[in-house]
Image (spheres, rainbow, N blue to C red):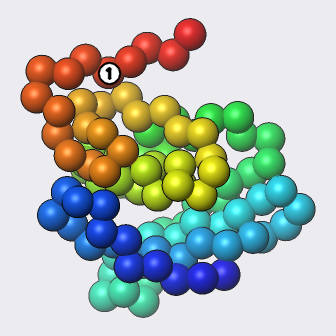
Amino acid sequence: MKTYEYEPGNGSRYFLAYGPLNKGEHLFVWLRRNDVGGTAFRVMSHFTVIAQDYLMEKMGIQNDADAAALLGFLESKGHEVWITSNHDSRGRYLSGAIPMERA
């Protein structure tokens, strides 16, 4: 497990922990409470894609921009993600953009 100070370019700083858990699985933690506590998400080996609404539900995230930025971090670690809000993978708002539909 390794900790990260992630600054994706949306004006926010995220304190994260990420690392291998079990075979093919990873643990992702957003340390949003004074950089020492927060919520965890287990990236299981059978996930083919991590959808924004699923991550938001499981981690209790209320802000689309935060969720998009966190998915950008997971994408940088090799996971396939699906951002459904009008934000890019850095959590920046895309004015007038329409989220892509998944086939």
Q: 11 or 34: which is nearer to us?
A: 11
Tell me residue 35's x, y (percent).
Answer: 36, 86
Q: In which quadrant is the C terminus drawn? A: top right
Residue furthest left as drawn:
95
Q: Residue at x 30, y 39 (%)?
A: 88
Q: In which quadrant is the N terminus drawn? A: bottom right
- Does residue 36 appear to the left or right of 102 in the view shown? left
> In this picture, is 10 found above or below 15?
above
Residue 56 visible in the picture: yes
Residue furthest right as drawn:
23
Tell me residue 56's x, y (percent).
Answer: 42, 47
> In this picture, is 52 found above or below 79?
above
Q: 60 or 87: which is nearer to us?
A: 87
Tell me residue 99's x, y (percent).
Answer: 32, 21
Amino acid type, residue under disc 1 in the picture:
Pro
Q: Residue at x 15, y 64 (%)?
A: 11
Residue 59 visible in the picture: no
Q: Residues within 10 Å of mark 1 (few under 14, many from 20)?
A: some
* Residue on which disc 1 sits: 99
- Does residue 12 appear to the left or right of 89 in the view shown? left
Quadrant in which residue 32 is drawn: bottom left
Q: Residue at x 77, y 70 (%)?
A: 21
- Does residue 23 appear to the left or right of 90 in the view shown? right
Tell me residue 92's x, y (percent).
Answer: 20, 46
